[in-house]
Image: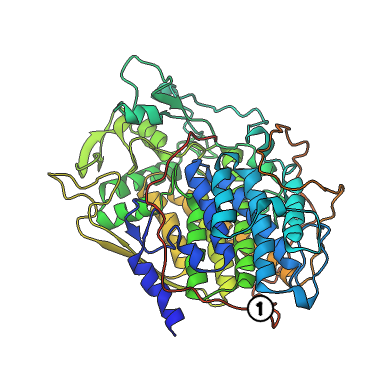
Amino acid sequence: MAARKFPIIFAVLLAVSVGVTAARVGVAPAGAATDGSVVLAWNQQVLDAIVATKTGPTIAARALAVVHTAIYDAWAAYDPVAVPTIANGNSRRPPAQRTLDNKNKAVSFAAYAALFDLFPTQQDAFYRQMTTTLGYDPADASPDPTTPQGVGTLAAQAVLAFRHQDGANQLNNYADYTGYKSANSWNTPLEDIDPDHWQPLCVLTDAGVKNGMPPTPPAGSTCEAPYYKVQTFLTPFWAKVKPFALTKPDQFRPPGPYTYLGADGKPSGQYVGQIDKMTQYSKQLDDFRKTTAEYWEDGPGTVTPPGHWNQFAQWVAARDANSVDKDARMFFALNNAMLDASISAWDGKRRWDSIRPICAVRWLYRGKVIQAWGGPYKGPSYIKGEDWIPYRPPTDPAPPFGEYASGHSTFSGAAAEVLTGFTGRGNFELKVTIPAGSSKVEPKTATQPGVPAKPITLSWTNFRYAAEQAGLSRQYGGVHFEHGDKDAREAGSRVGKNAWAKALTYFNGSAVPIPTTTTTTTTTTTIAPTTTEVPTTTEAPTTTEAPTTTSEAPTTTEPSTTTTEAPTTTTTEAPTTTTEVPATT
């Protein structure tokens, strides 16, 4: 009983760095993963690397999928039924070898090799995890499939070989190869903006923040380094990335955004209506809505939306005292759904390249006075339409990609379905307490109480409710219209159900692993990859359609020799400050 009560205490007492500040509590905290299975420890390594490198949400989703696919494929060799996603040279290990020690070692060598490849600048941290924390020697990596380190190494090598050619262009630093150009430029005059298309903004750099520069360049200046930069659309080619269960990137594509001119060539009431609703939310912002917007923001230098749901999964793993067998499956299914969600969402973002609220409000109401949030500590005010701002930090006024459809809503809808499917019941029961005055937008000062004025507790009875709040938070924050949120929630739910159905086929052994065309025999080393080869193929697979049945709970595959370890009641908190490196996206 004590093991079941622990996660509730753990949720209330430990600090995390999700959403708004490092003082916020409730989600699985950095470092707490070490109290569960080794899968959680490696999951936390991925999240730490995402934060340290300021990785964007698409690349973060893929990284999580790659690491946890390598982990799962290594683990599958020790299960009596499960099959790997890729034929990797490993055979099913005999029952006598299906021990917890062997599983942990195989999983760790797989995770280490994958992370070493994905995050070259973070290799020292991964090395410390392997050696100091877990007691393994990375030099033991080998292609011998009769040893756990060989099983892990071969699994990771096969996954990496497949993903190096998946259209993400990892080996060329995820550079765009499709020639994307925005319809509007950052300095297009308001009256000349195309009101249906995304406009990049001129935003502060880290140097600009450190030197106290204003959020926008002074009048008459240009958007130049070192203090400012023009936003670049994040991974506009992402629909070309090979998915997990999607048969094509637009399989669950939503109907599209409202455009300014309707079919009759007249201004659309739906277009104007969504902007009016945005300004209504803006002027009606209270502490709860502001706190909700900030909690779910997950912007640059955070774990990102896919990582946020991984932290939720860490909490679920601790609550349910998951074994390594359960965690290998849960995080595999979750993160491949996150990969598919990223592909689905970015398919729409590139297809419609739609305008963000900050630009749409300013364009529609230029030269007019509106009532809206007036800025930090000002509350509802009468402002010029062209001065409207969303409830976000001034250094990050809007994400660097199109509005429709919401990535947060797609990721959250997909994650909720996978976690509901895996747990078999969907109850969440997590509470997150937000300390008074902890806002980044309106923090407590000597003269201001800050937001929230009193502690606020966010809670979710089930995963789907959490996903709904995540989507709604984007409307509160002023970065998504209602249409772009709700359509994405529905698409994300369909993506998640589809991915969960596909994952079940691997768990129950009915799936056919992807064949490999070459045999990789090199061993993992501690030398950073030096290749910059661009992926040669960007076609999505057409043979990965998932079954339509999604209600089946995961088959329990732990052999009798498996030991299920409950998390202990002692946790080690990771530092609440993170050293940020320049973004690569």
Position of 514 relative to 359 (above/below): below
Tell me: 72 left or right of 322.
Answer: right
Q: How is the image coloured?
A: rainbow
Picture coordinates of residue 217, whole percent (x, y): 34, 22
> Quick one: quadrant of the C terminus?
top right
Mark 1 neighbour density, 10 Å: few (under 14) some (14–19) many (20 or more): some
Q: Position of residue 375 (x, y in %)?
A: 25, 39
Q: Nearer the viewer, residue 277 or 381?
A: 381
Disc 1 designates what residue? Answer: 562
Residue in the picture at 60% in, 36% down: 236
Amino acid type at circle 1 is Thr
Q: Secondary structure at mark 1?
A: loop
Nearer to me, 264 or 378: 378
Q: Residue furthest top?
A: 220
Q: Nearer the viewer, residue 65 or 382?
A: 65
For image coordinates 52% across by 30% down, the residue present is 232
Tally of marks: 1
**Considering only vertical position in the picture, is 94 above or below 502?**
below
Task: Classify the position of the N terminus by image quarter.
Answer: bottom left
In percent of width and height, residue 364 lies at 37, 33
Camera sees residue 79: yes
Give me the residue at 34% from left, 31% from top: 209
Single out the residue that lies furthest toward the bottom. 1
The answer to which image quadrant residue 87 occupies is: bottom right
In this orientation, does residue 80 appear? no
